[in-house]
Amino acid sequence: MRRPLIGVTVSRRSGWRIFPLIAFNIWLAGGRAVRWQAGRDADVSAVDGLVIGGGDDISPDFYGGEFVTAARLDPARDALERRLVGEAWAQNTPILGICRGAQMMNVALGGTLHQDAYKVYSTSRHVWTVLPRKTVCTAEGSRLAGLMGRAGIRVNALHSQSVRDLGDGLVIAARDEGGMIQAIERVRDPFALGVQWHPEHLFYLRRQRRLFRALVTASRAYRARCGQLGAVSAETRLDPLRE
């Protein structure tokens, strides 16, 4: 059986080292990845799922925030990913957002961000590491809780921004001990989940691998559903009187 194809967006600065790691996680989960970045062709209809990766800060122009001189911006990447999220959302293509990717999911759907999250959430543990040194708790009844359990999930943290106001169709899926939003998800099927941490660095932890497995499983189901619709459409064209 063909592995579901997952489009993965990465930074033009760091994509050369991040993409192989995400692709490895997707392969372990049963999928295969194609690299997308600003300046390259990217077509949601050509893939079965989508990963919006981490990296650059999102321009405050996208959500009415104030410009911060320390921000590292890539307007071309912002435009690309906002388009891809919108198209994937409209086509019901499964989405996994990683760190910046979770923030982009939120912004693309009309939400806003805290540009200096730890200034707002002063009691949140401020760590900057790829190691699992931060604890988050998932929301009761959330898809994420079903995947990873309710409490005591150890994650890493490489972010300074976080979700503020939720975008349309999204709910909070996890917070840290200080109350900062650490994950968001779609309120209904199909699969669309954004996490503030970097699970691609934590492939040695079974619970973290479940995120990629859930994406690949949803992508496989999406491909099968599209195939069924295509078959019905072809059958209808052959028999225009078929009801």
Image (tube, rainbow, N blue to C red):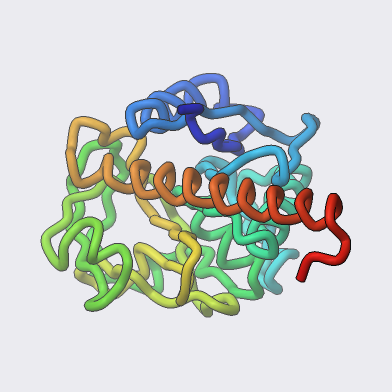
Location of residue 6 in the rendering, given as x and y in whole percent from the top left corner: 55, 37
* The C terminus: image quadrant: bottom right
Q: Position of residue 235 (x, y in %)?
A: 76, 52
For this view, does 239 lie left or right of residue 82?
A: right
* Side of 6 where 63 appears, left or right: right
Q: Residue at x 22, y 37 (%)?
A: 131
Front-lying residue, 170 or 44: 44
Depth check: give the residue in front, 242 or 127: 242
Residue 42 rendering spot, x and y as whole percentages: 74, 37
Give the quarter of the image for residue 156: top left
Rendered view: 40 above or below 159:
above
Q: Residue at x 64, y 70 (%)?
A: 109
The outermost residue toward the left is 152
Q: In the rendering, at what x and y percent does residue 104 appear?
A: 59, 58
Residue 151 to residue 78: above or below: below
Question: Does residue 190 appear left or right of residue 73 in this picture?
Answer: left
Q: Residue at x 26, y 32 (%)?
A: 203
* Nearer the observer, 44 or 154: 44
Q: Is residue 59 above or below residue 3?
A: below
The image quarter in which residue 37 lies: top right
